Image (cartoon, helix red, strand yellow):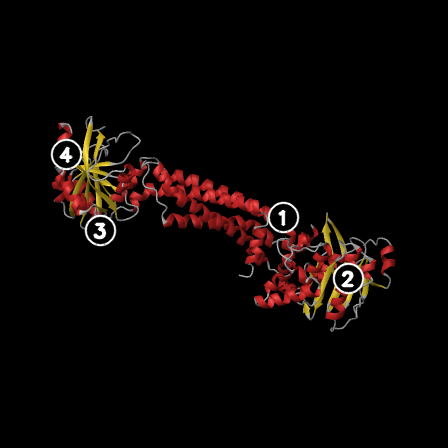
Amino acid sequence: MVRVDGSGGSNSLIGVRGLDKTYHRGGGEIRVLQGLNLDVDKSDFVAFMGPSGSGKTTLLNLLGGLDVPTRGNITVAGDEITHMSGHKLTEWRARHVGFVFQMYNLIPVLTAFQNVELPLLLTKLSKAQRRNHVETALGVVGLADRMSHYPRQLSGGQEQRVAIARAIVADPTFLLCDEPTGDLDRQSADEIMALIERLVREYGKTVLMVTHDPVVARRAGTTLHLEKGVLVESAEPERVAAGGRHEI
Amino acid sequence: MKFRRLIFANLFRKKIRLLLTIGSFAVALFLFSFLAVVRDAFSRGADIASADRLFVINRTSIINPIPLSYRDKMLRIPGVKMVTHDNWFGGVYQDEKNFFPQFVVDPENQRQVFPELIVSDEEWANFLKDRQGAIVGVRTAERFGWKIGDRIPLKATIWGAGNWEFNIDGFYHGKRPQDDETQFWMQWDFFQEHVPDALKGQVGWYIVRVDSPDDAVRVAKNIDAEFANSPFETKTETESAFAASWVKQFGNIRFLILSIGTVVFFTLLLVTGNTMAISVRERTAELAVFKAIGYSDRKVLFFVLAESLAIAIVGGLLGLLLAGLAIPVLANALNGMLPQLVLAPSVFALGFMTALAVGLASGLLPGLGAMRLQIVNALRRI
């Protein structure tokens, strides 16, 4: 269950309290997030919407330990990540977070297999165990027959599937998807969303996703709208998207 | 090493750039090795000098002679074990470009004072019996295709005029690869018969063997003291000091070579550093992804350094291999104008270490940049 009022207990998988993020630009301050609260349970599928510059990606970066908040704290599976050192945070990301980016961000000189294997190279798994994990992950995303293909030999949808396989191969605590369908046509976008839904439904994955697309957002269990630096639960993504730009 | 495939995949990302960078390394290392070999060739005399040998020359200059009568006086100085003498002949064989060093030697003591230059007993015996005999270093013999029994004319340039003819009675070779195998030895007695009267009984320099290397400095002082205030004052040095001062006559070879070597080194550093910087800049987003999925800053630095080191190792070894193949050819083409050029293991090791140092240095700045990359900023650039 997803809550944005700070009422979630310590049982939440992800707990965010009083999160502030301020950027300093051109001598002025831009306060992107203001005292934001969020609780996400295991196997929740949350979509974040909001106009450009509303801080969706900033929130995702903070949840993924890629950036540090100005104030507040984030707890994931009992780990308070906001005060971790850079090195600890790197290790934490490797163990707990799977990233899916809008532009796939595969390594062009590596095959699909090798791209998916990348997170496992940081573990102590043997070569055979790594192979087994990679084959399973590529099987889940339906690309078992494309293992030796390079990214340039795959379609956009297939590349994003490989990126999802890379995100899930080390069995992270949760997935962070930043506009996962933003660079895809409608059919490919539907396929990717069906895959993400399946990861939540069949494999119990927790997914936090940023999207501009109300059709995509509707696939999530909960859609949250970033408004003036705080999260608001929205029942109708279409209305939010059609409602124009919300300046912070 | 599980990251090997990743490192190699990145290396071969831009094949032409990789080949050109490896090529720059190879050419630079070839040049570096060649310079080091030339420097070694000039300093080899000092390096291989025997610790128990002293060279005694005229205090005014090596071209001024010293009387033969000094030999017996030297032998009486405590610590002196053996004395021999040489004269520079300076003849021309057919053409001036066919240069090789020719020495008038004292057959009685030559082999004892220079035990590292080997002549068979049989050939030496033939030499002693033949006043017009000559012993030739194997490199010079190979160069001109000489064999035992050949009659060799040398045109005198210092000691009168006309051709002097010699019979080749044998060959010598060095015990060590660095030993000079280009000399031509002729007999003192034959020389004495043909030089003008005014020059008879005068030697170019003496070579003294001492009982113990520990006594070398004391004996040298005593020799010079013995002949102080005489018409032919002497200057006695250890063989290594003598060889070093001989090389100085050619100018500051060491400085020249060091200067060129430094320019080569820094040019290579800039070329490779630039290549690595471009390579890293092109991959900013990928490096950010690596860091996002859990690769530490140190691992990112390691990847960049591993790439630059791999280029350095391959390019360096290629350059050294080229040097190994080309230096003997160049040495032959130089026709003995330079001391023997040998790519010694120490030069090879120095070249390889230089390649590694350049590889490390050229990857360090881009690597540190990659290490400090802010993931959020880098991903925003995509």
Q: What residue is shown with label 4?
A: B190
Residue A60 at x, y = what percent? 73, 60
Q: What is the chain letter for disc 4?
A: B
Q: What is the chain letter for disc 3?
A: B
Q: Say whether marks 3 and 1 touch (CB < 8 Å).
A: no
Among numbered discs 3 and 1, the one appearing first in the sequence: 3
CA gap, disc 4 and disc 2: 104 Å
Q: What residue is shown with label 2?
A: A193
Q: Residues within 10 Å of mark 4 (few under 14, many from 20)?
A: some
Q: What residue is shown with label 3?
A: B214
Viewer-nearest of discs 2 and 1: 2
Dot 3 and dot 1 within a common chain: yes
CA gap, disc 4 and disc 1: 76 Å
Q: Say whether marks 4 and 2 touch (CB < 8 Å).
A: no
The amino acid on which the numbered mark 4 sits, given as a three-letter code, is: Phe
Which type of secondary structure does the marked residue at label 4 adopt? Answer: helix
CA gap, disc 3 and disc 2: 88 Å
Q: Residue furthest top?
A: B161
Regarding residue B4, the answer to whether it shows in the image is yes
CA gap, disc 4 and disc 3: 37 Å
Viewer-nearest of discs 3 and 1: 1
